[in-house]
Amino acid sequence: MKRVFLAILVIVQLSGYAQKEQKVEIKPKPFITNHQGGFGGETIKYKGTAKETYLKNAQGNSVASFWSVAYMQKESKPTNVPTKSAPISRTSLVVLGTVQDAGSPHIACKKDCCTDLFENPLVSRKVVSLGLIDSEEEKTYLFEATPDITEQLKTLKTIAPFMAPEIPNGIFLTHAHIGHYTGLMYLGKEAKDAKDATVFAMPKMKSFLESNGPWSQLVTNDNIALEEIHDNEEIVLSPNLKVVPFKVPHRDEYSETVGFKIIGPNKKVLCIPDIDKWQKWETNIIDAVAQVDFALLDGSFYSGNEINHRDISEIPHPAIVESMKIFETLPDLEKKKIHFIHFNHTNPILDTNSKQSHEVLYKGFNIARINDVIEL
Ligand SMILES: [Zn+2]
Ligand SMILES: [Zn+2]
Ligand SMILES: [Zn+2]
């Protein structure tokens, strides 16, 4: 009996609402369509929303309406496939990360550069690293063991045109700063428990790893096998592939710092992710660029504006604005070789659409982006 009474009440209520609703408004219905198009060589999926919006007066009555159409890029799914369309079939370098050691978002950052990224991280923001695919010998190599090594090694394996090993045939380290070697921890017992993974390191870097825990445990457990390399001494990976380390000036608390020249069957690449000022290096950077086909160069900061408008001459990196000044008079073909890399979280270059990114490209230089492929 009680139940029946309740049911009637509900019906009365509902019909009451229905009557009121009719008087007030008919809700506008949005029309959503899905699209896909090519923009600047990139395939972008986007959503079109067409709808009418009613404007109401103080009494809540609709007095005007307008029609709008909005296009929004759909959230792109994480992808490990290089953005360049050509599949990697030849011996190549692939950019596996472009960010400075501490990544993006950056710990405790409250600035605009990172606020959104804590909730919506971007898969493209990985710490600086290069993968080397030797398609003739069917081997892979990694430059830098970053905190993002887990994903970076999977990408390297996935894009190789042969059955590549999970752990590459060699890992090259530039120096003992957190973004460049701490990924080695994933080769230890708590993670992969690798067996004799070859790690190429300069003498001081090698003895730092051998004599300090937890790294020394990787050595005693044979997770890694250290191969000592030397300043300006060629490492022959195959008859068609060589790597030459060379010392550069940098904050060398625990190790030397090196850059690498990677010499492939047809092309040479210079890679200097971390350096103090170009002027502090005994080699003239312009001459060094002249000897190669591509140069991946330290672009940690765009200008002094990122660090409380500090004088750029005080920053222990060549700011991109300083580097562009040094290379200003070079012919276009030389400028084109230069790809900036190793971006601090504050660097507006990380945003492909920033005016600074456009400025760098406009001036004839390039910016390294994740998944870029350099055929060697
Ligand atoms: Zn670094
Ligand atoms: Zn930030
Ligand atoms: Zn460093």
Image (tube, rainbow, N blue to C red):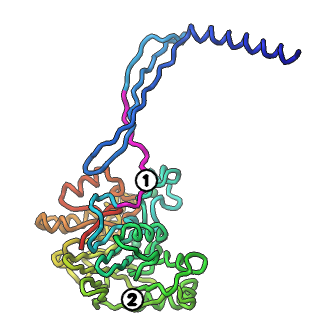
Where disc 1 sits, the SS reads loop
Q: Looking at this rendering, what residue extends furthest in the left direction?
A: 331
Classify residue 360 as left or right of residue 73.
Answer: left
Q: Residue at x 29, y 84 (%)?
A: 243
Sequence-first disc among 2 and 1: 1
Foreground tag (2 vs 1): 2
- As drawn, the label of residue 202 is 2
Residue tagged 1:
113
Residue 347, percent across and down? Answer: 36, 59
Relative to the observer, which residue lies in front, 198 or 136? 136
Mark 1 and ligand 2: say if the CB distance to the nearest ligand atom is below 8 Å.
Answer: yes
How busy is the neighbourhood of tag 2: few (under 14 within 10 Å), some, or many (20 plus)? Answer: many
Q: Amino acid at mark 2?
A: Met
Q: Is residue 120 magenta?
A: no
Q: Amino acid at mark 1?
A: Cys
How busy is the neighbourhood of tag 1: few (under 14 within 10 Å), some, or many (20 plus)? Answer: some
Relative to the observer, which residue lies in front, 284 or 350? 350
Residue bounds of the magenta highlight: 69-81
Q: Quadrant of residue 259?
A: bottom left
From the viewer's perspective, is residue 169 above or below residue 373? Answer: below
Classify residue 150 as left or right of residue 35.
Answer: right
Classify residue 276 as left or right of residue 193.
Answer: left
Where disc 2 sits, the SS reads loop
Q: Give the spatial CA distance, label 2 vs label 1.
A: 35 Å
Mark 2 and ligand 3: say if the CB distance to the nearest ligand atom is below 8 Å.
Answer: no
Q: Quadrant of residue 3?
A: top right
